Amino acid sequence: MSADAKHIEEERRLKDVLREIRTQLDAIGPRYTGNDYTEQVLDDLRQERKARLEVAQREPYFGRLDFREGGQPAPVPLYIGKAGVGEESSRQPLVIDWRAPVSSLFYSFNGGDPNVSYDSPEGTIQGTVSLKRNLLVRQGVLQRVVDSYEEGQDAGAAVSDEFLLHRLGESKDNKLRDIVSTIQQEQDAIIRTDKNKALFIQGVAGSGKTTVALHRLAYLLYHYKDKVKADRMIILAPNRMFLDYISGVLPELGVGDIRQTTFADWAADLLGGSVTLAPPAKTLERWFERKTTEADKEGAPGRLKGSVAFLRRLEDALDRWEAELIPDEPFVPHPGVVLPAAQIREWFRSEPADEPVLKRRERLLNRLKRWMEIQLGKSRWGDKTIRSNATAKWKQYSNKVPSPSAVEFYAGRFPDEFAPAKPSSKRKPVVAEAEDLPPLALIQLRLYGTDSPKFDHIVIDEAQDYSPLQLAVLKKLQRTPSMTVLGDLQQGIHDYAGIRRWAELTELFPPEETAYYELDRSYRSTMEIIEFANRILAGMEGGVKPAVPVFRSGEPVETAEVSAKDRADAAARMIREWSGVPELSTIAVLCRTAESSERMHVGLRERGIEAALLTADQQAYGGGLTVVPVYLSKGLEFDAVLIPDADEDAYGPADAKLLYVGCTRALHRLKLLYAGRLTSLIVV
Ligand SMILES: Nc1ncnc2c1ncn2[C@@H]1O[C@H](COP(=O)(O)OP(=O)(O)OP(=O)(O)O)[C@@H](O)[C@H]1O
């Protein structure tokens, strides 16, 4: 069939599908506003369906796979889209949801042997593929039709990456996007991994880790409809700006109601407002504005307080405290009415051990009270004086069974590690450093537990910045170890608090409960940028594997010498040049420190260039032209990146990860300026 004939065939079908979607949308009618509960529930379902149909109306599908199931006479064309749509009259699927079992073939089949299989609830389904087609539909209009496989094509013939390359070549705005139409095989395998595993993903910069994790959530909600609920999932990301950056992906995938937060915000919430996080600026100042060495980092409080050794110390302290909780004395509410200490201990031990200690304490004290009332009998209990004396004794006894807050416990038992300044009033929260939140959360959970239901699934992004203790705390909030934990050790710029090896985290689980994946292909940047960034990786310790680029070529990466006084002029020139290129809609100037960022920001303004300046407490990233301290750029990406101070002085031997993060933020253009000597982190 000629290309034109294919286009006409697909246009015709698209028209039919859009007509059906329109009819279904029209039939939904206005919202129900009455008080009937059943009607309200039905209306919610209708609204959900409406939202799905509206997504489908813009772009009903992006792929077609002709598949002949074993035993069937002919192939059936399967159209794959973001949301499934069925034909009302025939009940036949018109569009198949990308998460359905059969859709996995679209992602995993890359030419070669057309005999394929996929796993479905009914078992393994075998069959053959006769066509794999990519379709680009925008606002209901068919724009491109590209076949990446047709029956009879040479076995093993390379399947064109045309669609992927087209997509990667686009410019970026200020939000991460979904990738359903171009998910790659190795990414799809992660997205579809079983729910009951703690999945660890080490992926090079730009390999799609964040994106894949979000798609995995959408997959889990679809595949385990009855077992996994959005309101029992949580996404933990490094800061609020990053959360804002990723906030568009899940709604576009039709997923709502997933809590997206930072560990610090989650922990502060758990601690019921008794603690607030110290502004991060001081920590960032300590580690990024001044020179540091590996030895400084290794001895940092975050490393020590996040370690498994410290976890054991905390647990030992909690065990000991619990063992000594019941005083070694009987309860005597009235002369001669004696409940021996051994009996009270026995009662305490018989409380369910998985309940928080202070809940068990409360129940025990209530039991003592009931015992006291029974022992004193009707007549004595009726006597007001006896009753009030007995109640006073009970209160006295209760006071001897301590019930400290998490802050009191931590400060009391670990005075060398935690000595917060006293808040000015009792109602004011205590200010804690980031590394003190996991210990406090651990103590809070053991003492008071949480009212929230256990999580069905937890996503931890930028997990190289997590400590073993942090993960151990989160693990306590789940029935099964269903987690997606992703990161990149080579971007571990916060390794004064985070991990150096994945084993530090995986060791918290029995091996059969974990799975480990590596993503080596990088999708964000051009070949030139990836090869340049690989030169920084080459200098890192421990034989780091280089990132593998997708074959997308762009402009060469440039390094240029400037005199320190001409730096801002040179930066302004570069920005002006880039601003004239329509494809470059987001441009970032990544400076080594917050201080140099401020200077650059002012310098640009003096030269007539208005840029946004990102700071540590930023809530959102707005796109356009931005000046950013390089350590705050992690997780983000920009069409063009300028590093104006790649000097030997600015990027010393301990800063390789920082420079790697900076260079790998660029999609299409990267330029480095330096005064004096270029940093030797770029291996020749
Ligand atoms: N299969 C894909 N198809 C199209 N684009 C993709 C694909 N995979 C990743 N990308 C794009 O690559 C870029 C990087 O993705 P993402 O930010 O998820 O990577 P990451 O591994 O979390 O990066 P980093 O660790 O550097 O922050 C994004 O723009 C994303 O849309």
Image (cartoon, rainbow, N blue to C red):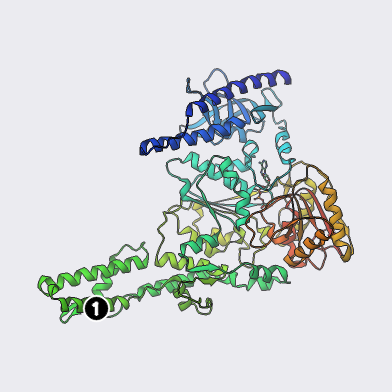
Work out which residue is located at the far bottom of the displayed protein and give it: 335
Mark 1 falls on what kind of element?
Answer: helix
Residue closer to the observer: 669 or 597: 597
Left or right relative to 294: residue 572 = right
Q: Disc 1 marks which amino acid?
A: Ala
The residue positioned 51% from the left and 30% from the top of the image is 125
Say few, some or many: other residues with alpha carbon within 10 Å of mark 1 (under 14 / 14 to 19 / 20 or more).
few
Left or right relative to 45: residue 208 = right
The answer to whether 240 is drawn above or below residue 554 in the figure is below
The residue positioned 46% from the left and 62% from the top of the image is 270
Left or right relative to 184: residue 29 = left
x then y, percent, for residue 293: 71, 72
Q: Which residue is mark 1?
A: 392
The answer to whether 220 is drawn above or below residue 383 in the figure is above
The answer to whether 595 is drawn above or below residue 96 in the figure is below
The quadrant of the rendering that contains the N terminus is: top right
The answer to whether 678 is drawn above or below residue 76 in the figure is below
Residue closer to the observer: 600 or 184: 600
x then y, percent, for residue 454: 43, 54
State the count of labels. Answer: 1
Question: Which corner quadrant of the image does residue 324 belong to?
Answer: bottom left
x then y, percent, for residue 288: 70, 67
Question: Which corner quadrant of the image does residue 143 belong to?
Answer: top right
Q: Taking the image as drawn, is residue 60 in sight?
A: no
The quadrant of the rendering that contains the C terminus is: bottom right
Residue closer to the observer: 280 or 470: 280
Work out which residue is located at the far front of the displayed protein and give it: 34
Q: Taking the image as drawn, is residue 377 in sight?
A: yes
x then y, percent, for residue 667: 75, 47
